[in-house]
Image: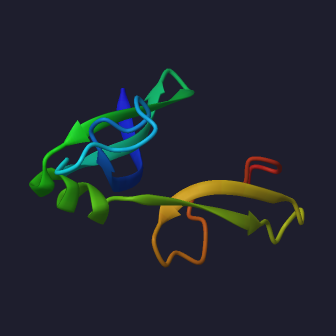
Amino acid sequence: MTKMTIGVYKSNKNAGRFRFHRKNTNKIWKHYFLDEDEGEYTFQTEWVSAFKAIILKRNQQYKKTFVCLECGGRFTAYVPKNTTEYKDECPHCGE
């Protein structure tokens, strides 16, 4: 079971329960991630501390579209920031 970080953002603790936020409510960091369990991904969230949010932001993954040079097929993959090429093999042709 691994966690792939998609985003780390600040959010109000009471978001979604009321139309307007209460005054003097502090914002807390929220961790959005994909939890991989036996090849299946499930979207989950959790509240984290400010220190852990800094660490998670460094390991954040971004969804990008790539084109295979062999078969010309397009596919999307989660990769680190500023990555221009996909290191694993193409899901269509296997190269």
Q: What residue is drawn where x is 32% and y is 49%?
A: 11
Q: Quadrant of the C terminus?
A: bottom right
Q: Is residue 73 left or right of residue 21?
A: right
**In the figure, residue 31 lies in which quadrant?**
top left
Q: Is residue 28 left or right of residue 72?
A: left
Q: What residue is drawn where x is 35% and y is 55%?
A: 9
Q: Quadrant of the N terminus?
A: top left
Is residue 22 among what the camera can see?
Answer: yes
In the rendered view, tell whether residue 4 sits above or below residue 60. Answer: above
Residue 34, x across and y down, in percent: 46, 37
Residue 88, x across and y down, in percent: 58, 56
Is residue 89 among what the camera can see?
Answer: no
**In the figure, residue 64 lies in which quadrant?**
bottom right
Q: What residue is drawn where x is 60% and y is 65%?
A: 86
Residue 44, x across and y down, in percent: 43, 31
Name the one closer to the observer, 29 or 65. Answer: 29
Residue 72, x across and y down, in percent: 89, 66
Q: What residue is drawn where x is 41% and y is 33%?
A: 18
Name the one closer to the observer, 87 or 26. Answer: 26
